[in-house]
C-alpha cells in the first residue's frame, strides 16, 4: 500500500489569519504555485521553499506536511 504526502497549508493559514497571497509574497513564489502546493498537486517541494514556508507561518515542517496511507482498492 502506497501513501501520499498531504500539504496542510490551509490549516496553518487559518491559524495565522494569513491570506494565500500574503504567504506567497513572504515565501517568494507566485500565487499560482502556492495554489499548486495547497491543493496537493505539487510533485516536489524544495527544502528551501519548505524552510521559507515554516519561517513565514512560524511552524515546523510537520505542521505543514502529513503522510497519509491510501485505502486499499478492491
Image: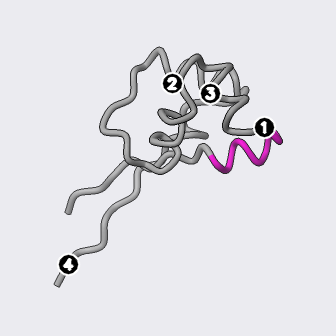
Where residue 7 sits in the image (x, y, percent)?
Answer: 50, 45
Estimate how packed mark 4 is, as few (under 14), some (14 to 19) or many (20 or more) residues with alpha carbons within 10 Å.
few
Where residue 9 sits in the image (x, y, percent)?
Answer: 60, 43
Q: Nearer the viewer, residue 55 or 20?
A: 20
Q: Which residue is mark 2?
A: 50
Q: Residue at x 67, y 50 (%)?
A: 11
Q: Mostly what secondary structure, the magenta segment?
A: helix
Q: Nearer the viewer, mark 3 or mark 4?
A: 3
Mark identifier at residue 24: 3
Q: CA distance from mark 4 to mark 1?
A: 37 Å
Q: In the figure, is residue 12 to the left or right of 73?
A: right
Residue that extends furthest to the right in the rendered view of this protein: 17
Where residue 32 sits in the image (x, y, percent)?
Answer: 50, 36
Mark identifier at residue 18: 1
Q: Nearer the viewer, mark 4 or mark 1?
A: 1
- In the picture shown, does residue 11 fall above or below 59? below
Q: Is residue 16 magenta?
A: yes
Estimate how packed mark 3 is, as few (under 14), some (14 to 19) or many (20 or more) residues with alpha carbons within 10 Å.
some
Q: Earlier in the sequence, mark 4 or mark 1?
A: 1
Q: Which residue is mark 4?
A: 73
Q: In the figure, is residue 30 to the left or right of 24?
A: left
Q: Nearer the viewer, mark 2 or mark 3?
A: 3
- In the picture shown, does residue 72 fall above or below 46? below
Q: Nearer the viewer, residue 66 or 23?
A: 23
- In the picture shown, does residue 25 fall above or below 6? above
Q: Earlier in the sequence, mark 1 or mark 3?
A: 1
Q: Earlier in the sequence, mark 1 or mark 2?
A: 1
Q: Nearer the viewer, mark 1 or mark 2?
A: 1
Q: Do tag 2 and tag 3 residues touch (Cβ < 8 Å)?
A: no
Q: Residue at x 47, y 40 (%)?
A: 37
User: What segment carries the magenta color?
Assistant: 10-18
Amino acid at each position: 500500500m502506497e501513501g501520499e504526502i498531504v500539504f496542510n497549508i490551509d490549516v496553518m493559514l487559518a491559524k495565522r489569519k494569513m491570506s494565500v497571497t500574503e504567504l506567497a509574497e513572504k515565501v517568494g513564489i507566485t500565487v499560482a504555485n502556492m495554489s499548486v502546493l495547497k491543493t496537493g498537486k505539487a510533485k516536489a517541494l524544495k527544502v528551501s521553499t519548505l524552510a521559507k514556508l515554516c519561517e513565514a507561518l512560524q511552524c515546523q515542517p510537520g505542521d505543514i506536511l502529513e503522510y497519509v496511507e491510501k485505502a486499499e482498492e478492491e
